[in-house]
Image (spheres, helix red, strand yellow):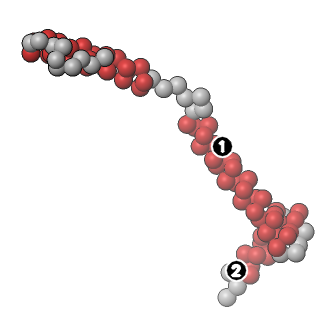
Amino acid sequence: MTLDQKQVRTREELKKVRAQEKQIETMRDRRKKIRVRLIPVWVKVAIVIFLTIASMLVGTVVGYGVIGNGKPSEALQKGTWTHIMDIINKK
């Protein structure tokens, strides 16, 4: 609701109109700043961590089973990982 300068006759009236407009804008801004979070931040962090671990496990099983021509169930066994670590650390 802005008024043209033609409708306002004096500077005082113009100042009053501008002050009213600023009050209306601040009231709108206050209403917009209130935010309700549906999912808390800690739940979002937990979901990201869970999805990261799950994707790593699925990638390991697919990589070992499909690409590596091994049994997918062997990808998560401790013996497989000790063998891989022995090959990596071999001097």
Residue 32 appears anywhere in the view:
yes
Where residue 62 sits: x, y (%)?
81, 65
- Which marked residue is nearer to the observer: mark 1 or mark 2? 1
Q: Residue furthest left?
A: 11
Q: Residue at x 73, y 53 (%)?
A: 54
Locate residue 70: give its quadrant.
Answer: bottom right
Residue at 79% x, 69% y is: 63
Q: 38 or 70, which is in the foreground?
A: 38
Tell whether 78 sits left or right of 13: right
Q: Earlier in the sequence, mark 1 or mark 2?
A: 1
Judge the density around disc 2: few (<14), some (14-19), many (≥20) Cα neighbours within 10 Å. few
Secondary structure beneath label 2: helix
Mark 2 = which residue? 88
Instruction: Using the numbered discs, state the Cα–Cα distance from disc 1 to disc 2 in whole angstroms.
Output: 32 Å
**Label 1 SS:** helix
Q: Which amino acid does the dot numbered 2 rest on?
A: Ile
Which residue is under mark 1? 47
Does residue 3 lie above or below 54 as drawn? above
Q: From the viewer's side, name the closer residue of 36 and 20.
A: 20
**Camera-nearest residue between 88 and 61:** 61
